[in-house]
Image: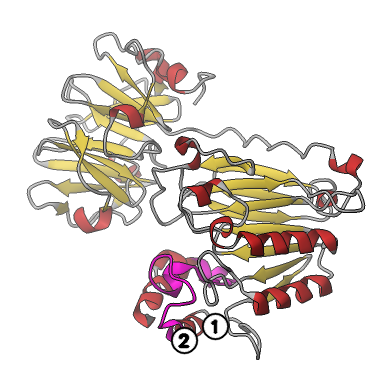
Amino acid sequence: MMGAQLRNRNHESLRRLAEVTPVLGIWDDHDFGPNDSDGRFENKPTSIAVFRRVWAQRDYGTEDVIGIFSTVRLGPVEIFLLDGRYDRIEGVQVLGQPQRDGLFERLKASDAPVKLLVSGSQMLPEAAGQLGWECWRRDAPAELDLILSFLGQHDIKGVVLASGDVPLGYLLHEQGHLLPDGRVGTEFWELTASPLANDTWTETVVSSGHPDRYLLKELESLNYGLVDVDLDRTGREIRLILKDECGAVLLDQPIGLDQLRVRSAADAAKPPLPVEAPPPTLAKLSPVIWSNGKAYFFHGERYVRVHLTTGRVDQAFPQPIAEFWRGIWRGGISAVVPWNNGKAYFFKGSRYYAYDVAGDRGEPGPRDVATYFRGLWRGGVDAGFVGSRGKAYFFKDAEYLRYDLAQDCADAGYPRPISEGWKGRWPTGVDGAFLGSDGAAYFFKGSEYIRYDLEQDCADAGYPRPIEETWPGVLGALTDDGVV
């Protein structure tokens, strides 16, 4: 147990974060014990001892109640860290009465304008429970009702919920309950942020067809969450935000503190503030030349097929990736690189799928990039292609490396800065690349592309040029407004 915790705690990315950012920890099943384990796990005394050593916070639990729950005050926010494992009994409770009673007392005593309840398991969703996923409504619906009712009956103001566990992103909202005196209890908002270091699930609530009256948004992409509090931002004091791994905003929900209290029926009837549209960002195109002589451009969850002679998008496109590319991710592909072994490799973050070209389907996976492509970046690649003389080239951010196909590893001396090895190309990186049928390399970034003469080792004159100039219809087909 200690070895597992230390491996996670000393992961290079987490260490960099913890060096400059205060970190508070609660656990979920994989920190506590086996998958979906609860308070009947026989080794839980060892587990909690290990967790408390590795995550050395000020205090855990109380003298009378064992657990990792605690509270931390940060300016206008009091964080209530819940222990949803030590006394959890599937189908009965998540917290248990002793922890729950202590939570109620701390909530009543708190004078913080914002009270952030942090749970390892999702609290509001109902479809998740119908799908068999761990959540409060599956494992402890009565206990959840007790907590939500308590908050309304005692007019505990400013409560926001945050959770993790599910490898997707969620924004959830529950209207306040009608109280006996005719007023309406506080509204509840929940932000679920997960994952940042793992692959997203291919099964989603939306695709399952299960209705969920609390679900406002489900995101099938890498993400992390922010709860932004500014009491001077009247009417929008709280913002629940999800961002992708590069920091681009995926979702931004403003909440007024006035919503998070008991109100009259008339005040409660006012609609919540709408989700704010994220600022425009350059969406990523992942292009590839396939064995049938066609070009494919992947974008989000869709793709188009392009005739190389005319450069035009074939009829009936775009199409969903999930319907025609079996056994890989349904969207968010970082790069597609055809190899010299009858396979193509679909990269997404730190993982990849091998795709059997002849069999037209993905092989079992996904696999870890750094394990099977020796010398590549642990975080995956942005683009790549197989060139001549048994070499492949991979690109990530402002760096590139040369990969030896026969030795199956990166060449010595790499990675190197793009600015040193590719004259006339964007030095800050690319969205995608492929080797054209004319022997030139094509690099894509935003709405532009560069043709690169590999023999002359430089970009052709007159580049970058608009993608739509050579491949008309690609951007319009993949992005509803025609803008990338």
Residue under numbered circle 1: 56
The image position of residue 300, as x and y in percent, is 43, 33
Q: Identify which amino acid the numbered label 1 is placed on.
A: Ala
- Secondary structure at numbered mark 2: helix
Residue under numbered circle 2: 45
Marked residue nearer the N-terminal end (2 or 1): 2
Residue 204 vs residue 384, the one in the foreground: 204
Per the rendering, the mark at residue 249 is none
- Secondary structure at numbered mark 1: loop
Q: Residue furthest bottom?
A: 63
Q: Is residue 484 left or right of residue 4?
A: right
The image position of residue 343, as x and y in percent, is 15, 37
> With respect to residue 265, does 325 lie above or below?
above
> With respect to residue 26, does 394 lie above or below?
above
Segment colored magenta = 17-46
Location of the N terminus (image quadrant): bottom left
The image position of residue 199, as x and y in percent, is 38, 50
Q: Residues within 10 Å of mark 1 (few under 14, many from 20)?
A: few
Q: Identify which amino acid the numbered label 2 is placed on.
A: Pro
Q: Is residue 139 left or right of residue 360?
A: right
The image position of residue 17, as x and y in percent, is 51, 66
Q: Which picture quadrant has residue 137?
A: bottom right
Q: Residues within 10 Å of mark 2 (few under 14, many from 20)?
A: few
Q: Residue at point 45% right, 38% down?
A: 208
Q: Which picture quadrant has residue 156?
A: bottom right
Give the main secondary structure of the magenta stretch: loop
In front: mark 2 or mark 1? Answer: 2
